[in-house]
Amino acid sequence: MKIAIVKLSALGDIVHSMVILQFIKKYNQAIEIDWLVEESYKELLVNNPDINKVIVINLKKVKEKKSILLLINELKNARELGPYDMVIDIQGLVKSALISRLIRSSLTIGFDRSSVRESIASIFYNKTYKYSYDKNVIERNLSLVNFALDLNYSKKDAHHKLPFLHSNSKYLIPKFSNIKKNILLIPGASFKSKCYPPTKFSELTKALDANFFILSGNSEEKELAMKIKIQSPNVNVLEKLSLNSLISLISQVDLVIGSDTGPTHMAWALCIPSITLFGPTPGKRNTFVTNINRFLESDSKVNPYKINKNDFSIKNIKVTDIVKISHELLD
């Protein structure tokens, strides 16, 4: 059996989807799995032993260049893929649904119109599955694959997952400590109201006796990192890393603390302790709680169907609460 999985972006969403791979292979090791993804996230997938082939679809480049010619070429490339026994669109957007439909396969599966953010996407599938959009994203992904392949995995099984992000080289972390616990802070996110204030991160570094690193993937994140460092000179600000190096970095630290963003979710994927901070996005939906992966959220009432980017309530999360959970995870 040969299947194609369509999940083009973004970092955290792809991580939340990749957990399904080990359960598919556990069911049937002989199933061939190809994965369609945007170029910028390819590195997240290429070293995964459960994926036979990573296929790049450059719709992001089409959008950036606003090129009809590029769009036609990408759609043509999708049309030449296959044949597959089944295509599963985990993303549930019009762009992913269209690509899924173009791939040569007799069966295209996705969520029904009531279960996706862009309801029109469901018209491109010839078999749909109902599972409320506001439910936990990990449970949604597992349920869709259970439906598609007639499996029987559950939330309980996800608690016993194996790490599923892989790096082909070890990142040598500068100033890594063999004495103190090493904690990675992730101050950046896709929009400002998801970011925990630098002043509170600085307060956190003074409340915990640990060796701190700060991730900075772009100029905005570098600015946040430097604001923390000004108040806490002993923290180590890391330069921008490749996804391959980021996987290696996270696999070596003792704890990751950050907002609802891809690198924080990577800790869960790697079975590394983490604390995810939520303000304008839904904690119970966007993270998977385990004995070592916890979350804190503000008292804001969040609508998963319509995120309020002007909701800066994440600043109300108390540093003392983060410290308390940190001790529980590190002791």
Image: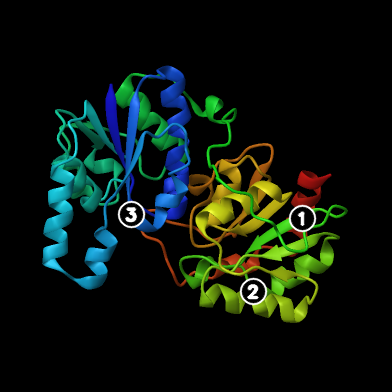
Q: In the image, what residue occupies the spot 15% across and 60% down?
A: 71
| Disc 1/disc 2 C-alpha distance (Å) | 17 Å
Q: How crowded is mark 1: few (under 14 residues within 10 Å), some or many (20 or more)?
A: many
Q: Identify the amino acid type marked 2.
A: Ala
Q: How crowded is mark 3: few (under 14 residues within 10 Å), some or many (20 or more)?
A: some
User: Label 2: which residue?
Assistant: 225
Which of the 4 image quarters holds residue 313?
Answer: bottom right
Q: Identify the amino acid type marked 1.
A: Asn
Q: Can you give x and y, in whole percent of width and height, for residue 83 in the image?
A: 17, 31
In the depicted view, which residue is nearer to us: 234 or 302? 234
Q: Identify the amino acid type marked 3.
A: Glu
Q: Judge whether 204 appears above or below 85 on screen.
A: below
User: Label 1: which residue?
Assistant: 182
Question: Does residue 136 show up?
Answer: no
Q: Judge whether 40 appears above or below 63 on screen.
A: above
Q: Can you give x and y, in whole percent of width and height, for residue 241 in the image?
A: 56, 63
Quadrant assignment for the N terminus: top left
Question: Does residue 166 show up?
Answer: yes
SS under mark 2: helix
> Is 36 placed left or right of 103 in the picture?
right
Which of the 4 image quarters holds residue 208?
Answer: bottom right
Q: Judge whether 282 appears above or below 288 on screen.
A: below
